[in-house]
């Protein structure tokens, strides 16, 4: 059982995360696999409420669920199992064997293929059937995906540009970004130069400005055929951010299997004012968690390399049996965790 849980946590390490911070830690013991937010790999300035860190952890949780299903294990998930321990985001408890899910087996391979491509998408627009399949994958995980109309895309572009201007004016934000994308970033995490465009891509909605050009060649084309969508849900609590990450994972893996490129765009939801602008794009019907760009993959050109990953031993802890404590009652708790930690914004965090 321990080997299966460690294997699931290892697969979870391939999940996407804000600035490739991989802000999760797993604890393995008995029949339980517990997910914790790792504050040493959080973005205190960019993400002070840990929205995006929790969303990133949700993507890792969905990866772990897939890995267990692919091995023929049935697991019950408890989200936010202990409101008094805010960093304990989820627990998977294996309750027995189950038929191997063929889709889960396929997706364990898709997980290793998925990566972030910041180049313009120059192919044709994503078809309606593919968009529907991606949106269905989001809804199956308890969130929604709103495909933006052309006029809404222009509103999004203005919001994203304003958000990036606001953040760039903050020296602490600049220092944090430089830490995770510069040459001194810790091994196994962060955004390397070979995944950052050599020059600013021609895109309708501005992508992340990393403060320097990278080594990734980009075409002179424009992504005018790209689509944009808002990942959103009914509430704005940690359990909702966690579920949003699970939805992002499901949508992204579905997209990869359909030949669709997904690029997360978080700037517009990082700033409170522009986050409200994005909320209006979904008619105030819910709370936005993330913006994504969707486009058909260019199969003629090789994509950028995969971002680095931490060794499993740095994100997985094993408990001795005597250290285990009884688990909480099954089911989700939507209580809002209190006392979330903060880092000194002028001092970049040091990963463990």
Image (spheres, rainbow, N blue to C red):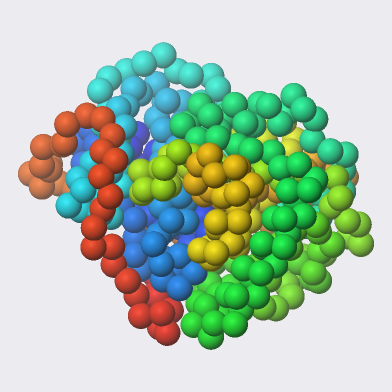
Q: Is residue 163 left or right of residue 197?
A: left
Residue 161: x percent and y percent? 70, 67
Task: Please name whichever residue, 348 or 80, is drawn nearer the observer in this view of the structure.
Answer: 80
Q: Is residue 48 left or right of residue 294?
A: left
Q: Is residue 299 left or right of residue 25?
A: right
Where does the C terminus fall, quadrant-wise? bottom left
Q: Residue furthest top?
A: 99
Q: Residue furthest left?
A: 322
Residue 113 visible at all: no
Residue found 47% across the figure and 56% down from its top: 52
Does 48 sit above or below residue 59? below
Residue 87 visible at all: yes
Task: Please name whichever residue, 139 or 220, is drawn nearer the observer in this view of the structure.
Answer: 139
Residue found 88% across the figure and 39% down from its top: 124
Residue found 76% across the figure and 66% down from its top: 197
Does 24 sit above or below residue 217? above
């Amino acid at each position: 059982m321990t080997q299966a849980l460690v294997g699931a946590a290892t697969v979870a390490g391939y999940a996407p995360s804000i600035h490739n911070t991989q802000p999760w830690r797993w604890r393995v013991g008995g029949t339980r696999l517990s997910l914790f937010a790792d504050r040493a790999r959080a973005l205190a300035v960019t993400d002070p409420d840990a929205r995006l860190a929790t969303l990133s952890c949700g993507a890792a949780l969905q990866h772990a669920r897939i890995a267990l299903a692919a091995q023929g294990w049935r697991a019950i998930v408890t989200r936010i199992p202990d409101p008094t321990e805010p960093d304990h985001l989820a627990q998977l408890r294996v309750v027995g064997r189950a038929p191997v899910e063929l889709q889960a087996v396929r997706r364990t391979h898709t997980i290793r293929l998925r990566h972030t491509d910041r180049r313009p998408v120059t192919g044709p627009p994503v078809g309606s059937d593919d968009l529907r399949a991606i949106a269905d994958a989001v809804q199956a995980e308890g969130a929604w995906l709103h495909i933006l109309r052309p006029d809404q895309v222009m509103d999004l572009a203005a919001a994203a540009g304003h958000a990036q201007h606001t953040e760039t004016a903050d020296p602490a934000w600049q220092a944090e970004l430089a830490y995770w994308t510069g040459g001194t970033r810790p091994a196994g995490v962060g955004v390397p130069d070979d995944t950052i465009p050599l020059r600013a891509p021609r895109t309708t909605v501005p992508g992340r400005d990393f403060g320097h050009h990278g080594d990734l060649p980009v075409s002179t084309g424009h992504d005018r055929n790209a689509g944009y969508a808002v990942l959103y849900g009914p509430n704005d609590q940690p359990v909702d951010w966690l579920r949003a990450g699970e939805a992002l994972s499901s949508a992204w893996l579905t997209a990869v299997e359909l030949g669709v490129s997904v690029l997360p765009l978080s700037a517009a939801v990082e700033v409170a004012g522009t986050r409200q602008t994005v909320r209006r794009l979904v008619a105030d019907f819910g709370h936005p968690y993330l913006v994504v760009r969707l486009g058909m993959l260019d199969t003629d050109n090789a994509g950028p390399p995969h971002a680095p990953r931490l060794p499993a031993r740095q994100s997985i802890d094993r408990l001795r049996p005597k250290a285990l404590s009884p688990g909480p009652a099954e089911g989700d708790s939507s209580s809002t965790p209190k006392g979330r930690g903060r880092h000194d914004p002028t001092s970049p965090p040091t990963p463990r």
